[in-house]
Image (cartoon, rainbow, N blue to C red):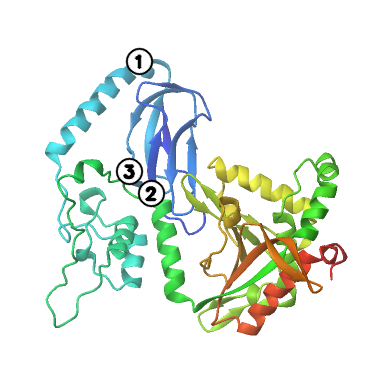
Amino acid sequence: MATEIRVPTLGESVSEATVGTWFKKVGDAIKADEPLCELETDKVTIEVPAPASGVLSEITANAGDTVEPGGLLGQIAEGAAAAAAPAAAEKVEKAAAAAPAAETKPAAGASSMPPAPAAAKLLAENNIAADQVDGSGKRGQVLKGDVIAAVAKGITAPAASAEPVKVAARPASSAADAPREERVKMTRLRQTIAKRLKDAQNTAAMLTTYNEVDMKAVMDLRSRYKDIFEKKHGVKLGFMGFFTKAVTHALKELPAVNAEIDGTDIIYKNYCHVGVAVGTDKGLVVPVVRDADQMSIAEIEKEIGRLGKLARDGALSMADMQGGTFTISNGGVYGSLMSSPILNAPQSGILGMHKIQERPVVVGGQIVIRPMMYLALSYDHRMVDGKEAVTFLVRVKESLEDPERLVLDL
C-alpha cells in the first residue's frame, strides 16, 4: 500500500508554491516525519515531512515545479511494494532523460490553458494580457512567478493604436565574458521581495527623516546589568529590546505611524506588532513580535531571539510573518552608517538603526566623544505628516538617551 505525499496547507492568501530541493531520491528509505523536500512560497520556505515510514517510490513534482495546496508530490511504498522502488527510480530517470526531446517550451500566448488564479490577478493588476507572458507551467500555463518576472522586465500592455511593444532583451555579453557568467533563476521569495519593495515605492508617498541618538546611557546600562540579566532571563541583553520598547512608546503617542491606508479609509491599530527585519541566506524576512507594547524588555529579547533562530533555520511559520504594524531594520550589524529604509507595505513606518560610532559632539558647551547612532524613519506621507514623523523620531531618541523613561513608562 502506498502513502501519498501531499502539499500541506500553505497559509492565508498563499495559493501556490515552488518545489525546491528534494532531500531524498527515489529508492531511499525514509522515516515518518523526516524532511523530504522544501517548498518555496512567496513568504517563507517550508519543509514537507514524510507522512509515513517506508521507501520513496515516486516523485511526481520535481524541483522547480509549481504546486498548489493538496497537490501530489510523490508516494511512499511500504512492505512488498517497496521492492519495486528501484524499478520505479529507473523509470523516472528514463522519463526525465527523454523529456527534453519530447517537450518544447510553448511560445508566449500559445497555451490553451488559462492563467493560474494568482497569475490572473497579477495580470489584471498590472494591465498585462496573458499572451504577453511566457508560461512555465504544464502545457504552457502562465503562473504567478511568470507574471512577476514579466513585470520585472518592464512588460506593459500595448497601446490600442500602436504595434505590440517589443521589450528589449538584455544585451548579450561579450564572448570573453559569457563563460564567466552564471544565470540562476530567482527564488519565489526573492521575486516577492523585489516586487513588494518596488510596489511600496510606487504606491506610498515615501519620505525619510533622520536624527541621531547618543547611545551612552543605554550602553552603560547594558554593561552594568548584562551578566545579571542573562543569568536571570537566559538571554543576552541586546539593543533591540530597548529600541522595540522605545518604538512602542512613540507609537502610542503618535498612532498615525502605526496605522495603514485601505482605499479611502484609515485603519488605526490599537496594538503594536513590531516586525524585526532579519537577513538570511535566502533573503530578507520580517518575523513579528506580537503585542510588543505589553512586553517587558526581557520578554522582547526572548521573542526576538526565538524568531531570529527560526529565521536562520528556515523554520518560520506563516503566523510568525503576518500582522506587523511597524518594522525595525538594523543595518548597523553589517556596518551601515546611514541608509533610507523602504516601507514594509501596507505599514506606514519603518525605523532604520545603524552602526554605533564614536564621534565628537557638543554636550553642555564642551566637545566630548560619545557613541552615536544615526536613526532613519521612512514613512508614508499620505498617512503621516512631517510634524508627526519628526516628533516620533524625537520620542525614540529621548527614550534611548534616558532609558529610565522606558521603565517608568514616560
The residue labelled by disc 1 is 83
In the image, 337 versus 191, the foreground residue is: 337
Residue appearing at x 55%, y 81% in the figure? 381
Residue appearing at x 67%, y 68% in the figure? 212
- Alpha carbon distance from label 2 to label 3: 9 Å
Report x, y in % for residue 370: 73, 61
Secondary element type, mark 1: helix
Residue mark closest to the camera, 1 vs 3:
3
The residue labelled by disc 2 is 187
Kind of residue at badge 1: Ala
Sequence-wise, the earlier of marks 2 and 1 is 1
Q: Residue furthest front?
A: 366
**Label of residue 305 in the image:** none
Quarter of the image that includes the C terminus: bottom right
Kind of residue at badge 3: Gly
- Alpha carbon distance from label 2 to label 1: 36 Å
In the image, 283 versus 81, the foreground residue is: 283
Check disc 3: other Cα within 10 Å, few if <14, some if 14-19, many if 20+.
some
Residue mark closest to the camera, 2 vs 1:
2
Q: Are marks 1 and 3 in contact (CB under 8 Å)?
A: no
**Label of residue 64 in the image:** 3
